[in-house]
C-alpha cells in the first residue's frame, strides 16, 4: 500500500483549494456532493484527518465518519423521498478506489430505478447546488 498523497483532490477540497458543494461539516468530517453522481443526492463523506482508506484510518476517525454517514443517510431519505440507501466504500485500486483519501459514498435509492454507471458524466453544477440545498435544509431542521 502506498503512502497518503497530500495533494489528492479531497485533500485540496479540505484545504479550500478546490470548490465543492458542501452539505455538512463538523470537527472531524465533511460531506459533499459527488461531482459524478450515480443517483440524485449522491453524497461523499470523508474525514478531515489524512488517511488513505479503510485499511489505514484511525478507528476513532472511522467512528466519526460512520456517524456522519448515518446522519446523511437519514437526511437523504427525507430530502429525496428515497426508499432506501446504498453505502459504498472502496479500498485501493484493485478494490475500485480512485481518489486515495478515505471516503464513503452515500446514495439515496428509489424502487425500480438503477444507479447511473460509475465514472459517468459530470453533473450540472446548478443541479448539484439544488440537491445540496435540499440536504442542507433537512439537516438544519433535524
Image (spheres, rainbow, N blue to C red):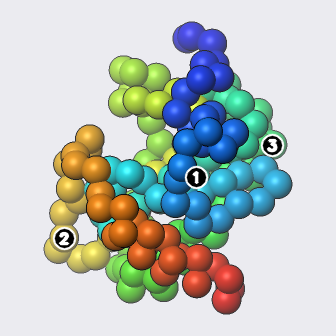
| Residue 95 image point, x, y percent | 39, 27
SS for callout 1? strand
Distance from Cα at disc 3 to Cα at disc 1: 15 Å
- Residue receiving disc 3: 60
Which residue sits at x=38%, y=51%?
35
Query: Which tag, 3 or 1, sits closer to the chain's start?
Result: 1
Q: CA distance from mark 2 to mark 3?
A: 35 Å
Which residue is most to the top?
Answer: 2
From the image, state whether disc 1 or disc 2 is nearer to you: 1
Disc 1 packing (10 Å; few <14; some 14–19; many ≥20) = many
Secondary element at image label 2: loop
Tell me whether circle 1 and circle 2 mark residues in contact (CB < 8 Å): no
Q: Residue at x 75, y 37 (%)?
A: 49
Q: Nearer the viewer, residue 45 or 16?
A: 16
Which image quarter is the N terminus in?
Answer: top right
Q: Which residue is identified by label 1? A: 45
Q: SS class of the residue under badge 3? A: helix
Mark drawn on residue 113: 2
Is any atom of residue 122 visible in this view?
Answer: yes
Q: CA distance from mark 1 to mark 2?
A: 23 Å
Mark 2 or mark 3, which has the lower sequence index? 3
Above-or-below relation of 88 to 83:
above
Considering the image in quadrants, where does the C terminus appear?
bottom right
Q: Position of residue 94 (x, y in %)?
A: 36, 20
Q: Residue at x 29, y 57 (%)?
A: 123
Q: Position of residue 80 (x, y in %)?
A: 40, 81
Q: Is residue 70 left or right of residue 50?
A: left
Amino acid at each position: 500500500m502506498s503512502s497518503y498523497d497530500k495533494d489528492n483532490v479531497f485533500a485540496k477540497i479540505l484545504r479550500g483549494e478546490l470548490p465543492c458543494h458542501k452539505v455538512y461539516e463538523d470537527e472531524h468530517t465533511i460531506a459533499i456532493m459527488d461531482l459524478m453522481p450515480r443517483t440524485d443526492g449522491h453524497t461523499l463523506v470523508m474525514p478531515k484527518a489524512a488517511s488513505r482508506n479503510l485499511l489505514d484510518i484511525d478507528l476513532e476517525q472511522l467512528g466519526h465518519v460512520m456517524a456522519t454517514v448515518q446522519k446523511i443517510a437519514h437526511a437523504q431519505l427525507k430530502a429525496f423521498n428515497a426508499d432506501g440507501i446504498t453505502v459504498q466504500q472502496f479500498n485501493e485500486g484493485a478494490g475500485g478506489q480512485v481518489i486515495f483519501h478515505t471516503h464513503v459514498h452515500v446514495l439515496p435509492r428509489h424502487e425500480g430505478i438503477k444507479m447511473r454507471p460509475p465514472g459517468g458524466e459530470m453533473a450540472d453544477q446548478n443541479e448539484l447546488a439544488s440537491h445540496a440545498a435540499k440536504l442542507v435544509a433537512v439537516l438544519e431542521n433535524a
